[in-house]
Image (cartoon, helix red, strand yellow):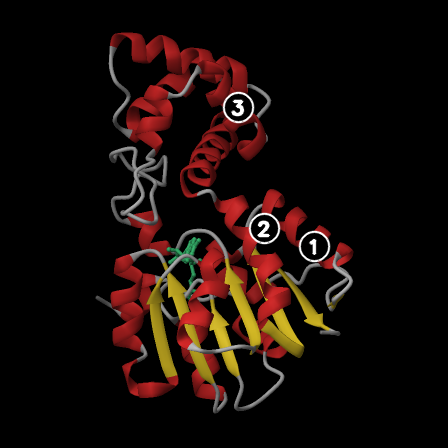
Amino acid sequence: MNQGVFHIPVMVDEVIRYLITKEDGIYIDGTIGGGGHSEEILKRTKCKVIGFDIDPEAIKFAQERLKPFGERVIILRRNYAQVKEALAELGVSKVSGFLLDLGVSSFQLDYGGGFSFRFDEKLDMRMDRASDLTAERILNEFSEEDIALIIRFFGEERRAKLIAREIVRYRQRKKIERTSELVKLIDKVVPRKYRLKTLARVFQALRIAVNKELDNLKVALDSSVDILEKGGRIVVISYHSLEDRIVKSFFKSNEKIRNLTKKPVAPKEEEIRLNPRSRSAKLRAGEKITE
Ligand SMILES: C[S@@+](CC[C@H](N)C(=O)[O-])C[C@H]1O[C@@H](n2cnc3c(N)ncnc32)[C@H](O)[C@@H]1O
């Protein structure tokens, strides 16, 4: 596989600028993905990286890419929400930085996971194939009310009730198995001019629910306070407003963390031109100021 194709890392210079405080520190890459951010961190410093991912394909790819750095890298197949437990198992008490680059990698988006409404695939959406909750199960087994809540809250979609009703009507005749079926039934109830936004919101909502993304983020932010040394940094790149709101309010409300980014940092025009998927990225950073 071509190294560049797996995923292009977003705002690399900004990540390094906010994350790195110690040349020889230990840094956590909670979402190692294709290893793009980790590779730059390892190249530009003498530090060690402990990487996490729940997707075995990402881990395989990152392991291969980061081989040249030998023992300076450890990659774990773990949820970043378990960062505290994982570090305790490794005998590491404090780290200098914790990076989270949320969401899916380009590889996941483009290859068979059912994350995108642009491809006809099975409605899976699990980043962690060991988990048993899929988008198909939500759509076929959850109540109409619960489906509407998921679409309303995780997708911030106004027509959630209408869409949930159509989902339930459809599944009474046939199990919903493929992304194309979900697209068709949404097309039936949503005006054409709102089509793309609605599809994006419904797919986002299902992905967040399947992967418990907001819960994991909250646990990881709380854990950062325990695992960071004084002066250590947490850097989060988020891609939608629900995530960004959680990060913003955590930085504002936690008295042990100083907010380093009053406004979120966005990619430069040039980066967006070269990598359109970076368009919605927002980076926030905080520093642990007291034990
Ligand atoms: C946007 S990509 C990260 C890309 C990476 N920064 C790079 O430069 O290649 C997000 C990655 O986080 C992983 N991920 C999502 N939720 C996770 C979780 N709760 N724990 C660990 N990894 C997770 C996904 O599988 C995906 O590989």
Q: Secondary structure at mark 2?
A: helix
Ranked by sequence position, the earlier of labels 2 and 3 is 3
In this view, the mark in front (1 or 3): 1
What x and y, as percent, mark residue 122? 25, 34
What x and y, as percent, mark residue 273? 51, 60
What x and y, as percent, mark residue 170? 33, 11
Which residue in the protein does label 3 denote? Answer: 193
Place residue 1 in its image quadrant: bottom left
Question: Which of the numbered marks, if any, corresponds to residue 250?
Answer: 1
Question: In percent of the image, x 54 and y 86: which residue is there?
Answer: 25
Place residue 57 in its image quadrant: bottom left
Q: Residues within 10 Å of mark 1 (few under 14, many from 20)?
A: some
User: Where is 167 relative to 18, above or below?
Assistant: above
Question: In percent of the image, x 45 and y 11: which residue is there?
Answer: 165
Could you tell whether 92 is left or right of 169 in the image?
right
User: Where is 69 relative to 5, above or below?
Assistant: below
Residues tagged 1 and 2 counted as in contact (Cβ below 8 A): yes
Q: Nearer the viewer, residue 166 or 198?
A: 166
Going by the numbered disc 1, the residue's amino acid type is Phe
